Amino acid sequence: MVRILDKQAVQPLRRFNLSRSFIIPRSPKRVSLASIRIRIPSVNAQPNRVELVATVGVRGITGIAQILFRIFRDGREIFNTLQGIESAASEQNYAVTFQAIDRNVSSGNHVYTATAENQTANTRTDVVGPISFSGLAVKTRS
């Protein structure tokens, strides 16, 4: 039996838009893409899982960048994935989608944040949209 505990979603950028683009900074700096707040009730919410899904539209500007996408819960990293982004003379525009599952989250309010950082020197990748980030908290079988 699965019961929904909470669901939240944000979409800071709804579509591809070069005029609203911004650079993904070089590691160790990172850019926050989106945040959501998920509430886990204090009664009858264990065991549970929070299913997180993010989509980020990016554009390769120079070189082949390795972009590290991370998800944090309350400032602590719980997930990461690496995506190569090519630039001119090849593919340039990408919609990168990734998902994570956070299991047995304690009761209370939790802030989940998706970030991006460029791990490759002398390359550039921009966020061009869309950006969406959602979380679904469910109680699972006991």
Image (tube, rainbow, N blue to C red):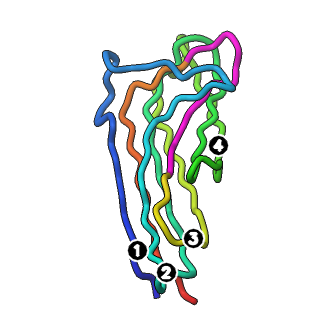
User: Please, what secondary structure does the residue beneath circle 4 have?
Assistant: strand
Mark toward the viewer: 1 or 4: 1
- Between 107 and 104, the residue placed more toward the observer is 107
In the rendered structure, are the residues bearing label 2 and label 1 in contact, judged by CB atoms less than 8 Å apart? yes
Q: Is residue 139 above or below residue 123?
A: below
* Contact flag, marks 2 and 4 (Cβ < 8 Å): no
Q: Which residue is mark 1?
A: 5
What residue is rendered at 42% in x and 55% in y?
37
Q: Is tag 2's residue or tag 3's residue first in the polypeptide sequence?
A: 2
Q: Is residue 6 left or right of residue 97?
A: left
Q: Secondary structure at mark 2?
A: loop
Instruction: Please determine whether, in this image, residue 97 is positioned above or below residue 8.
Output: above
User: Which residue has dot 4 on it?
Assistant: 81
Q: CA distance from mark 2 to mark 4?
A: 29 Å
Judged from the image, the secondary structure of the residue bearing numbered disc 1 is strand
Callout 3 crowding tier (Cα within 10 Å): few <14, some 14–19, many ≥20: some
Q: Amino acid at mark 2?
A: Ala
Going by the numbered disc 4, the residue's amino acid type is Thr
Label 1: few (<14), some (14–19) or many (≥20) C-alpha neighbours in 10 Å? some
Residue 78 among magenta residues:
no
The secondary structure making up most of the magenta span is strand
Q: Mark 4 and mark 3: span between their CA atoms?
A: 24 Å
Q: CA distance from mark 2 to mark 3?
A: 9 Å
Which percent across, then down, holds residue 115?
54, 37
Give amino acid for label 1: Leu
